[in-house]
Amino acid sequence: MLGVTGGIAAYKSAELTRLFVKEGFEVKVIMTKGACEFVTPLTFETLSGNEVSVEMFPRNKHFATHHIDLADWAELLIVAPATANFIGKTASGICDDLLTTVFSASSCPVLIAPAMNSNMWDYPAVVKNVELLQSFGFYFIGPDSGDLACGWVGKGRMVEPAAILDGALKIFSIAGSLKGKKVVVTAGRTEEPIDAVRYISNRSSGKMGYAIAIEARAEGADVTLITGPTMLPEPRGINLVKVRTASQMAGAVKEHFAGCHLLLMSAAVADYTPANPEEGKGKKSDSDISIKLKPTEDILKSVGRLKNSQVVVGFALETDNAIANASRKIGGKNLDFVVLNNPNEKGAGFDTDTNRVDIIWPDGTINQLPLMPKRQLAIEILQRAIRLVRD
């Protein structure tokens, strides 16, 4: 949840919203009436994809507990920019608008990014209010020193959006249920070379694995994401290991498996690779050609033999006899559960933002999950794995 108050630095919060959405977070914005004088709600609605909340009692809508619903929804509340007025009201427990009311009703971690004139920042009442909120356990970031909108040079400018994002990620790492745990996630496809320029691959986008890695990071885990080629932006706060081939992915997984607590193998690893790839570019001819393929290493089966106390989650893409084929992988590869999806189902194909899966357990229990965004599905999968890690 992002709270925006009435300061000129409100324009920076638009960029902050964009950065969080780019990182895969869902953002809801609450604006004070003062903030609306600097930036319109439409700006944040466009960037976040969610309706902006301004009024405590919005007209033509009935929200009996609007402020409680927003407070319960948030996993982290950020106020950027935070004016001296907002800080003072919050320290005194005053709830005279939607943002201060949501703030008082929230139980999630809070990150405050102040922005004001230097003299205002040094004003004794503001100093005392900041100290009081810090004693409540609220996090502060900034302000920075530099040129201020009023023409002064000094301390009071809001820190840059990228720094606020980094601060938020650190808070997630403190508050998450996977704090102190090492999680390894594989994602994307592999590319098996035929020659110097051609390869055999598949249509995996990597979106599912990246979503899982981002959620694991949000839960406080030390995350290593082993990824084949994708077109996705690199997520912050994650140890990214880039590989190309199935062999390289196998080596990277084995390297990081011994020290991890949880492995989620969502990558689409090639089952076969050319046996004799050419060093240069093969030339076209009028004759048919045959490419001899050899099996790649079954990474899950290999780590299953090495498994000690780790939780290992497998992923299966099946189109025929799906449940039976996926179920066999649990015992054959020593998995704790397997996530099954069928690309022929509507909304669950390659390179989509949604998916529908069945989670299959060793005792034969099947959790049939509905079609949902991959970010939400990542949460569903990860929460089941977290319970096993805790046990």
Image (cartoon, rainbow, N blue to C red):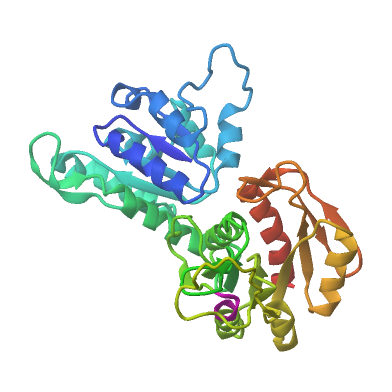
61 left or right of 358 in image: left
From this viewpoint, which residue is outermost toward the left? 152
45 above or below 158?
above
At x 40% / y 47%, what residue is drawn? 19
**Residue 328 x/y as whole percent:** 87, 71
Residue 274 in sight in this render: yes
Q: Quadrant of residue 42?
A: top left
* Extent of the magenta region: 245-249
Residue 94 in sight in this render: no
Label total for image: 0
Check if residue 273 falls in the magenta segment: no
- Magenta span main SS: helix
Q: Quadrant of residue 181?
A: bottom right
At x 89% / y 59%, what residue is drawn? 321
From this viewpoint, which residue is outermost toward the top? 60
Q: Quadrant of the C terminus?
A: bottom right
Front residue (pair 17, 356) = 356
At x 56% / y 62%, what residue is drawn? 213
At x 18% / y 39%, what residue is drawn? 120
154 above or below 215?
above
**Residue 317 x/y as whole percent:** 75, 60
144 above or below 41?
below
Front residue (pair 28, 22) = 22
**Residue 367 x/y as whole percent:** 84, 54
Front residue (pair 297, 50) = 297
**Residue 108 x/y as whole percent:** 53, 49
293 left or right of 320 in image: left
